[in-house]
Image (cartoon, helix red, strand yellow):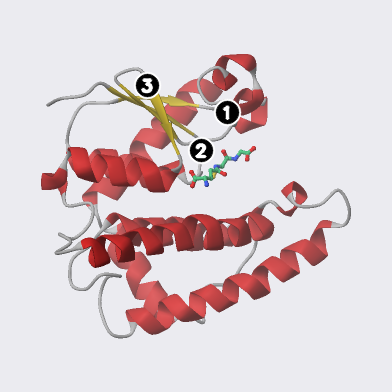
Amino acid sequence: MSHELKLFHGYTACTRVTLTALETLGVPYEDQIILFEKGEHKAPDYLSVNPAGKVPCLLVDGQPLTENAAILRWLHSAYPEAKLFPEAKDNWERAQQLSVLFWISSGWHPYVRAVKVPMMWTVGDVEPVRERGKELFSGVLDQLDAELANRRWWFGEEWSIVDTYFWWAYINSEFGGFDLSPWTNIARHRADNEALPQLQRALAREKAAYEARMA
Ligand SMILES: N[C@@H](CCC(=O)N[C@@H](CS)C(=O)NCC(=O)O)C(=O)O
């Protein structure tokens, strides 16, 4: 069954993961960039789509679905041939796949935010927030780097969308001046992600959408 899909996304935002998932499917979709710098995520037009005022929001046949983890799982169930996740042989493996998604969205994402945009976490001095964010972020990078010492991608020899979710998180920390060079397995994982055609298409689409609005 085909669906009408429209993604609301943001520049350099975690929607890069959702865009990459859509590019992996190879089906047509619309996209609309929401400009944070113009406050569009908190403006009435967008709040009528997603009252939380956050991206991503995927309209599926006109109905909104929010939260990366939910969107990625729904896309996987609706388009299994795209192999966004490995085939799970039982409920345990499905739960493991959810577990890593929630780890990134509720564990990694707040640390990245503290490093990249510490002003979102404090009305006071941003530097202590950024420094604490860097410490906490180093801890999860250590865990990822250790896992990647034994295999190419998170789930083994095959890419899955969680690899691009990790990629988005660690490259975003660089925007906050974080130095990723000590994590050598992550450097290799980064290069492998950046060579993916679906990721390159997603970045090109994001850039085109952004430049069209900023022209
Ligand atoms: N848990 C959400 C987080 C979504 C989120 O925080 N998105 C950011 C962009 S990366 C956003 O919309 N920020 C605007 C804001 O929080 O005001 C998810 O994984 O989808």
Identified at 58% across, 76% down, the residue is 138
C-alpha distance separating marks 2 and 3? 23 Å
| Picture quarter with the N terminus | top left
Q: Is residue 106 above or below residue 58?
A: below
Q: Earlier in the sequence, mark 3 or mark 1?
A: 1
Q: Nearer the viewer, residue 37 or 17?
A: 17
Secondary structure under tag 1 reads loop
Q: Is residue 112 visible?
A: yes
Please report contact status of discs 3 and 1: CB closer than 8 Å, yes or no.
no
Q: Is residue 181 visible?
A: no
Q: Residues within 10 Å of mark 1 (few under 14, many from 20)?
A: some
* Location of mark 1 (residue): 35
* Location of mark 2 (residue): 11
Answer left or right for 201 relative to 131.
left
For badge 3, the amino acid type reads: Gln
C-alpha distance separating marks 3 and 1? 22 Å
